[in-house]
Amino acid sequence: MATGPGADKTTVEREEGSRLADRIVGFARMLRRAGLRVGPAAVMDAIQSVVTVGIERRDDFYWTLHCTMISRREDHALFDAAFRLYWARRDEREEAGNEDEGEEAEALREKKRAGDRRAEDALDEERRAIIKKRPEFELDARLSFTAMEVLRGKDFAQMSAEEVADARHAMRDLVLPFDRVATRRFRTDPHGARIDPHAMLRASLRTGGDLILPKFRSPREIAPPLVALVDISGSMSQYSRVFLHFLHALTEKRRRVHSFTFGTRLTNITRPLSRRDPDEALEEASQAVRDWSGGTRIGTALGDFNRLWSRRVLGQGAIVLLITDGLERDHIEILSREMERVSKSCRRLIWLNPLLGYEGFEPKARGMQAMLPHVDELRPVHNLDALGDLVAALAAPARGGGLARHFQRAHMKGGRNANV
Amino acid sequence: MSQPSTRDLPQSIDDTLTLLTEGGYVADRALATVLFLSLTMQRPLFLEGEAGVGKTEIAKVLAAGLGRRLIRLQCYEGLDVSSAVYEWNYAAQMIEIRMAEAAGIHDRSEMESGVFSEKHLIRRPVLEALESGIDGPPIFLIDELDRADEAFEAYLLEVLSDYQVSVPELGTIKADEPPIVVITTNRTREIHDALKRRCLYHWVDYPDAQRELEILARKVPNANATLARQVVTFVQKLRELDLFKAPGVAETIDWATALTALGKDSLDADAVSDTMGVLLKYQDDIARLESGEGERVLEIVKAG
């Protein structure tokens, strides 16, 4: 960016210009390697914008590239880091090879990965501690021991490869729920309840205006957004992995499915899951998630969801699927409060609990008891049948009822009256 | 106003910054850069940010500063073509048909052109925005796009790519000169990438303390200087807490106005708790501040 002293100015400028364009293309390539989506159109825009704005000021240059190459706030941090790395190093080393952006992207990713690994290591320890503690669950100890055995036997993930493939197929073939909410848009409908003046006049002209016959319309219906919150803590991870397959199948067929995972932290995996190929999608999703099989803090995770995401994804009558075993030991108050907030912000809150798959299981743990009053439905999710039932349940219009009410009535002491 | 009502588009980023400042909008350089680019490249400006950070205001200031007409399309769920783009005046059309009958016109095409003629067309914001006034193309503000459903978003994509609208009975209506489009969203849902890609994206963040103080000085000029400083520090501290809804600039302005109206020239515990409802809109947040955190923040503010 330093102009050559003396020399023929126009040539210098032209040369500088095309070099700058090359550098911008290189920068875009680096961003892409670091995982941002920067299309060729964006690069063209960026170059044109830089020509318009000029490069006299570094912050102008920064924001020019920023507004043309970035279209999500989440990408800001990565852009910022990349910008510093790419455009600062150039100043330092005047003439190095210009095909070094691969290295730089690699360095950027390497940094991220190292961070991941550290987090993973930390989580590993936590997980071990939790596994050790496991027998102390407030579940009936006898039941829980045999139950865990049964659970392993039924693990989706421990099915043979063939069985898993079958399960996936079955999941893809699940007929998706036909739940619908009315919008304020209209479609023509001979049995509709409202007059459609536009259609009437158009039709009347067919008869030369002699007849103006009534036409009707009715509200159009669409599938409401679906938000899945998947617990991926150690006790849940086997189910969660399978459930992600199910979510992927859903995401493919239905609009507006948002997926989050939580363990010790909340991660949005909607974008990774939207890849077409299920293996790729899941691979990408698990890379995005940093706390597979760690501990779980349901209350705080829900709190994060409420604060950061609920307003963004729970609009327009969303249904929330909460997949967790509800084995929260501490912070029951937080859990209860955040559950209430989630419940009040969505149209329907369905809790999927794999533990329900056990014969005779009853949600007595304190965490579960704190969550129960706020859910509309409680369902098992431990095998394919359960998933099939879930799909059927999504289609059912009922709010309330189901197992949640049953358990509440049976176990909340002096609990509320439930009409089943 | 003594200055001419219309004004040319700004020629540089500094020009843009001046334009905004003259309109009473205290902007940072990042925003001015994006706005300048959007004006020169004739690309829609896509502003995203929390509620109350002044997104809508940008379009208003721009319209006033450039002396252009401001056409505002407030989005909501179920927004459809008849309320966003155009509608026919059915009553007038029916009269037209009867008149034609009375006059003995039975030629179909003649009648059709009479019934579906431009005089019966009710123009809604999108169609209006395609018409340049004498002072140039208008500012087209599409407010809170996240509230509209995806169907409308897809339609908008079409309008914004060609700046034309087709009315089946009338034909295609094309803008002579594309309007200056400003889109705002509060992120209650994600807007599709395809639409974003056509726009210049900018995240409007909360201002820093110094800029917020400047905003207060402009918007609430009669507020005491100490009060203004304390209000800004207090609000900035609140934004650091993990509240369910952090106060925006609009709330800061409201709060300073409220405190000034109450005759306060500095913050005290009573004043804060009496007027907390102006600043925070969720009971959880208010309860949290009242349980001690508010006093702690106040102490920090007073010490600073």
Image (cartoon, grey):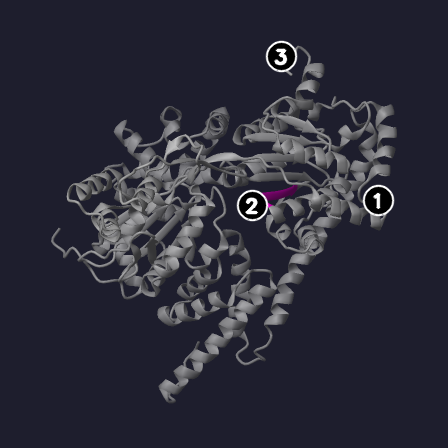
Q: Are marks 3 and 2 on the same chain?
A: yes
Output the chain of dot 1: A
Foreground tag (2 vs 1) = 2
**Mark 3 neighbour class, 10 Å CA radius: few under 14, some 14 to 19, many 20 or more:** few
* Residue of label 3: A417
Position of residue A118 in the picture relative to residue B192 (left or right): right
* Residue of label 2: A255
Q: Is residue A80 visible?
A: yes
Q: Where is residue B152 shown, x and y percent of the image? A: 42, 47
Between A177 and A115, the residue placed more toward the observer is A177
What segment carries the magenta color? A254-261
Residue ID at (51%, 59%): A80
- The correct choice, above or below, for A78 with respect to A13 in the image is above
Q: Earlier in the sequence, mark 3 or mark 1?
A: 1
Q: Where is residue B280 shown, x and y percent of the image? A: 42, 31
Residue ID at (52%, 79%): A94
Q: Quick one: SS at disc 1?
A: loop
Q: Earlier in the sequence, mark 3 or mark 2?
A: 2
Q: Quick one: SS at disc 2?
A: loop
The CA span between labels 3 and 2 is 37 Å
Foreground tag (3 vs 2) = 2
Q: Amino acid at mark 2?
A: Arg
